[in-house]
Amino acid sequence: MVGQTMSELVRFSVAIPEDLLMQFDNLVARRGLAKNRSEVIRDLIRDALVDEEWDDPLQEIVGTLTIVFDHHASDLQNKLDHIQHAHHEKIISAMHIHLDAHNCLETIVLKGRSDDIRTIAESILGVKGVKHGRLTTTTTGRYL
């Protein structure tokens, strides 16, 4: 897994246009007092490496799928439940929240091979009546 072991820090220099550096420094400032340029660059590198691992279909990933839907939509909840039960071995947890009289938010935590998790997420996001959704992933660093 990216960032799992601590190794010796290596210094290197980067040539960057001044306006881009100013924008980057604004990003560093928005990330908080505990962040500095080096820490933010390390975060960005780790994010890029995790994204790269997500592209490997055999890589184990953990993801959260967040969806918003109208619970009054015809048979929607049964369809969502059916998909989740069909993949119970990869779904770790699910949380259902009532946003208002019509809308619900559901967060589903999944773990497994990246290709399997992507397929499950796409099948849920493709159910008629799901208004919006997003899969957010990270890696465990393991291959399955």
Image (cartoon, rainbow, N blue to C red):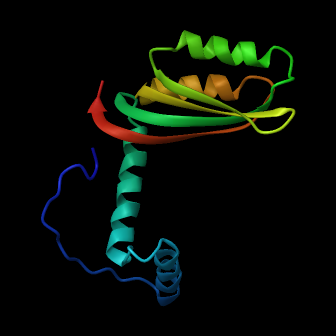
Return the residue nearer the eye: 2 or 106.
Answer: 106
Quadrant that contains the C terminus? top left
Return the residue nearer the eye: 122 or 92.
Answer: 92
Report whether 33 appears left or right of 94: left
Q: State which quadrant residue 95 falls in.
A: top right
Does 59 sit above or below residue 15? above
Q: Residue at x 43, y 38 (%)?
A: 55
Does 73 sit above or below residue 106? above
Q: Residue at x 23, y 49 (%)?
A: 4
Report whether 65 appears left or right of 57: right
Q: Position of residue 130 (x, y in %)?
A: 76, 30
Q: Where is residue 66 in the image (x, y as percent from the top left)?
A: 63, 37
How many marks overall? 0
Q: Which residue is drawn at 74% across and 18% down?
A: 77
Report whether 98 appears left or right of 88: right
Q: Which residue lies furthest to the bottom in this view?
A: 18
Q: Position of residue 97 (x, y in %)?
A: 69, 34
Report whether 67 appears left or right of 69: left
Does 53 sit above or below residue 43? above
Quadrant that contains the N terminus? top left
Q: State which quadrant residue 104 falls in.
A: top right
Q: Position of residue 47 (x, y in %)?
A: 41, 54
Q: Residue at x 43, y 28 (%)?
A: 111
Q: Which residue lies furthest to the left in this view?
A: 8
